[in-house]
Amino acid sequence: MEKLINVAYLVASVLFILGIKQLGSPRTARNGNFLSSLGMLIAILVTLFDKHVLSFQWILVGMLVGGAIGAVMALKVEMTAMPQMVGLLNGFGGGASALVALSEYYRSGFNTQLETIISIMLSLIIGSVTFSGSLIAFGKLQGLVTGNSVQYPGQHVINLLLILLTVTLSLLVVLQQSLQWAVITVVGLGLLLGVLLVIPIGGADMPVVISLLNSYSGVAAATTGFVLRNPMLIITGALVGASGVILTNIMCRGMNRSLMNVLLGGWATAAQLEAARGKKEIVIKSVDAEEAAMLFESARSVIIVPGYGMAVAQAQHAVRDLKNVLEQKGIDVKFAIHPVAGRMPGHMNILLAESQIEYEKMYALEDINDAFHQTDIAFVVGANDVVNPAARNNPSSPIYGMPILNVDYAKTVIINKRSMAAGYAGIDNELFGYPNALMYFGDAREAITRLVNELKNHS
């Protein structure tokens, strides 16, 4: 039986790897998700046949309750709220790992092997940090907690002291396993650290935070696998942890910043730096729906650049209608996706795919940037920092060096925003004052719907 279990675990592991590989492309992501889910189903069913499982009653109850909650979330949560749900699920994973480790600590009778007690303490620390940190990330994304960077004097010193205290208490437990007060204190410190490590990070860095917390949840699962001596859990956790680190690195490259810069507060002082230098007055030109429609009528090629403003306004369906009416007029339409547009990796791709926009129309930054030179209109929908030329032209800008979409190279740039408010980096967008830039103000869904109606009237 043990050999059959290990073979099944191997099959599940291969399915996980194949699934992760296929998740790298929008075209194959759905199949990749199915393969990964199938692998997890095999792993769960095989684990239930393990001789260590003594009672199935509460396991079945947990599966039914958890499955019902998951089904409701999958059906009810809007695609625009997907970042919040991912953050919450990361927290659930970390919390589950911490609870399993804590129960194993008490089950062992305070007398277990060295490697097991070390794994227990690691699971408690990483799991509790992931749980509370993910709840704060969820709160920021949901608007329950301020999306601004919350900083206070001496925060880095305080965090360092808390980390040292947590490590010290964990070592004491390893040496003297009966110190229950120390174990509970470690859990409490982990929960506090999760809050203090995420609360200073602003909304602009949520893609990095989400992918990093995803990695944390994987590492927590892997350490719990060592606690339970379950190879499948170790493999699964290692895959999630490694893929989360890789994705985090991609997100950081997308902003030309180090992970440490993000964790230490990122662009928190960007607005103050700009204020100290003195803001330059930007002279803008604006258009209404009728004028914008006339410009689109004369275009032969259009690149649409979606941003978080599109997600907030739930304007993806209106954007699809715009694409359709433009294509009916013989206009070539593409979509340019910045790696950190939105609140989680792939956020814009998910929203566009949900509105039935073809995967072939979506291009990554490195694949589309050279095309702006030959484009008649670049239409920016709710994006800000990811199209700010200051990242390319202004060495004193906080976002200097960040890869951006070169929308300013298009013949005409039309920017849809509700107002002239700065982006998450806290700085004005110099693109708005460019000679070839036009502002089209209004809520994205309403404004684009008006534009579509004007284009239809011109038919």
Image: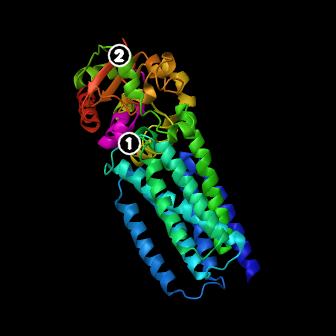
Q: Evaluate if marks 2 and 1 touch, with contact meaning CB atoms under 8 Å apart.
A: no
Q: Nearer the viewer, residue 328 or 105?
A: 105
Magenta part of the chain: 299-324
The circle drawn on residue 181 is none
Left/right placement of residue 172 relative to residue 348 reads right
Is disc 1 placed on a helix, strand or loop?
A: loop
The relative height of residue 454 versus residue 183 in the rendered view (above or below) is: above
Residue 297: percent from the left, percent from the top? 33, 21
Q: Amino acid at mark 1?
A: Val
**Which residue type carries mark 2?**
Gly
Camera-side residue of 451 and 217: 217
Counting from the top left corner in percent of width and height, residue 39 is at 62, 66
**Considering the image in quadrants, where does the N terminus appear?**
bottom right
Measuring 55% from the left and 67% from the top, which residue is drawn there? 97
Coordinates of residue 138 in the picture (x, y in percent): 39, 53
Residue 443, position as x, y percentages in the image: 25, 35
Q: Quadrant of the C terminus?
A: top left
Q: Residue tagged by mark 1?
A: 150
Q: Nearer the viewer, residue 453 or 108?
A: 108
Q: Residue at x 58, y 54 (%)?
A: 164
Residue 278's disc is: 2
Q: Choose top left, top right, bottom left or bottom right for residue 223.
A: bottom right
Q: Quadrant of residue 423?
A: top left
